[in-house]
Image (spheres, rainbow, N blue to C red):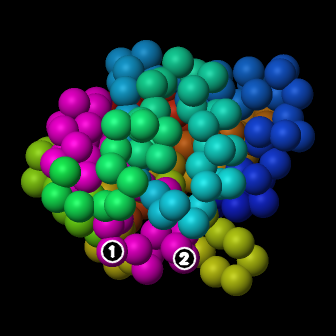
Amino acid sequence: MAISQSILRSKASNYSRSQIKAACESYNFNQAKSAFLCHSHKDEELVKGLLVILEESGLDLYVDWRDHSMPETPNGETARKIQEKIKSSDVFLFLATASSKASRWCPWEIGFADSSQKGIYIIPTTDGYGTYGNEYLELYSHIDSGTYKIDGRPGYFMSKPGETSGYAISNSNIR
């Protein structure tokens, strides 16, 4: 199931430290130390919620608007810096929203990551109007929310392309 955008919005402000820690135990990225986050700048609030989850797990998450070396107006230098960051990251994460679907940069970034043979993971989201992601995003593994069958606890899961069930995220299956 796609991750609710309202949950991402609430992560940074409404979750207690113990809830954040519990959520991050599911995101154990011990093998992957760094990730490039592809997203639309219009989704800054969603990105901040995702940062709470992922950075608490020890993952160094690159977000371009936090990089003060980026040019103020996007240009060729911007594209070169993004290419360098994608190449130097262990994995590539794509936050799928209506805004990233309409972005000029996001399809280019995932195309570059694909040609670089990066581990690519789509994070589909839903906002009550729909679930987001272009058809080509179905080619990649995705990170979804759901519940554990054994005890009903909420968690995050990685599924392979075309599958609707998957594995709880751990250091053994992210790479």
Please, which residue is most extreme toward the left here? 115
Q: Residue 34, located in which quarter of the rendered image?
A: top left
Horizontal placement of 96 versus 34: left or right? right
First in sequence: mark 2 or mark 1? Answer: 2
Identified at 60% across, 37% down, the residue is 51
Which residue type carries mark 1?
Arg
Q: In the rendered image, which quarter contains the N terminus?
A: bottom right
Horizontal placement of 161 versus 132: left or right? left
Query: Is residue 113 at all visible to an observer of this figure?
Result: no
Which residue type carries mark 2?
Ala
Q: Nearer the viewer, residue 165 or 130?
A: 130
Horizontal placement of 129 versus 89: left or right? right
- In the image, residue 71 sits, relative to residue 22, either above or below, namely below
Label 1: element kind? loop
Label 2: element kind? helix
Identified at 52% across, 61% down, the residue is 41
Q: Nearer the viewer, residue 5 or 25?
A: 5
Residue that numbered label 2 is attached to:
98
Q: Bounds of the magenta span?
A: 78-106
Q: Is residue 145 magenta?
A: no
Q: Position of residue 84 (x, y in %)?
A: 18, 39
Residue that numbered label 1 is attached to:
104
Q: Nearer the viewer, residue 18 or 45?
A: 45
Q: In the rendered image, which quarter contains the C terminus?
A: top left
Q: Position of residue 79 (x, y in %)?
A: 21, 55
Q: Position of residue 15 (x, y in %)?
A: 85, 35
